[in-house]
Image (cartoon, rainbow, N blue to C red):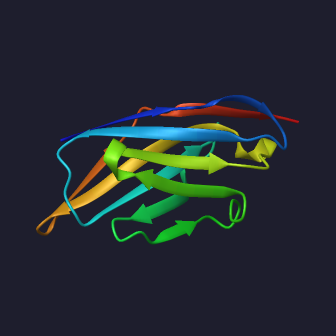
Amino acid sequence: QVQLVESGGGLVQAGGSLRLSCVASGSFFSPNVRGWYRQAPGKQRELVATISSSGSTSYADSVKGRFTISTDNAKNTLYLQMNSLKPEDSGVYYCKRTQWIGISKYDYWGQGTQVTVSS
């Protein structure tokens, strides 16, 4: 089992920055993929960024060049640095961990943190 706790959300003006954190606890296995997702009211949850256990990253086109995903494995923490924020970046941000034990895949989600960008 893995528990994920996000923090760092809040209210920010357009053009501002926020850094989200996701602290993980429990039993960790590799390979794994960690990521950030977001969900705006009335919309489906969407992928924002991911980082694999090998260090490979990927980003949604809408955040490329503005957001950076990173990890501090010593602290079991996943980060999302968000710069040049836009109102359309508003939503609840969730961290997710996917890990494999043999051929079995396990997904874990945090409870989410609210990000609101005012225009």
| Quadrant of residue 75 within the rendered picture | top left
User: From this viewpoint, which residue is outermost toward the front?
Assistant: 74
Q: Is residue 16 above or below residue 32?
A: above
Query: At 38% from the left edge and 38% from the top edge, which residue is drawn?
Result: 23
Which of the 4 image quadrants contains residue 69? bottom right
| Residue 99 as seen in the image, left or right of residue 104 | right
Of 43 and 6, which appears nearest the observer?
6
Residue 77, x across and y down, in percent: 40, 44
- Residue at 73% x, 41% y is 17
Q: How many marks?
A: 0
Question: In the rendered view of the protein, which quadrant contains the N terminus?
Answer: top left
Q: Which of 44 and 87 lies nearest the eye of the viewer?
A: 87
Q: Give residue 10's position: percent from left, percent from top.
A: 66, 27
Residue 44 seen from this side: no
| Quadrant occupied by the C terminus | top right
| Residue at 77% in and 35% down | 117
| Residue located at (67% from left, 48% from top) | 82
* Residue extending furthest toward the left: 102
Residue 54 seen by the camera: yes
